[in-house]
Amino acid sequence: QVQLVESGGGLVQAGGSLRLSCAASGSTYNINLSGWYRQAPGKQRELVANIGSGGLTNYADSVKGRFTISRDNAKTTVYLEMNSLKPEDTAVYYCNVKTGWASQYSYWGQGTQVTVSS
């Protein structure tokens, strides 16, 4: 069982920056994939970025070059550095963690609101 708590969301002007944090607790030893998703009103939840146990990262095309995902050495905290924010980045951002040798277990945080004003 893994518990996730996101923080760092808020209101920012277009072109600004924001850093999201996701703190994991519980059975974190077998975390092998961590990532961030977002969901805007009227849209489906989409993958923003993720990072595997070996450090391999993946980004949505819409955020490449602007967002950076990172983690601590113990893989218990995941960060999302968001730069050059656009109004279309406005969404609820969710942290997601997968555990188990086959990533068969998935856990979600409560979400944090990011609002980018024009």
Image (cartoon, grey):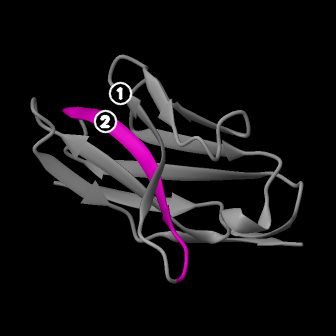
Quarter of the figure with residue 4: bottom left
| Residue at 67% in and 70% down | 90
| Residue at 78% in and 45% down | 83
Q: Could you say which is closer to the camera, residue 106 or residue 86?
A: 86
Q: Position of residue 118 (x, y in %)?
A: 89, 72
Callouts 1 and 2 close, C-beta under 8 Å: yes
Mark number for residue 33?
Answer: 2
Q: Could you say which is closer to the camera, residue 24 or residue 91?
A: 91
Q: Where is residue 80 in the image (x, y as percent from the top left)?
A: 60, 44
Quarter of the figure with residue 87: bottom right
* Numbered range of the magenta stretch: 29-41
Q: In this view, does 43 lie above or below 3?
A: below
Callout 2 crowding tier (Cα within 10 Å): few <14, some 14–19, many ≥20: many
Q: Tag 2, which secondary structure?
A: strand
Label 1 amino acid?
Gly
Q: Is residue 20 left or right of residue 54?
A: right
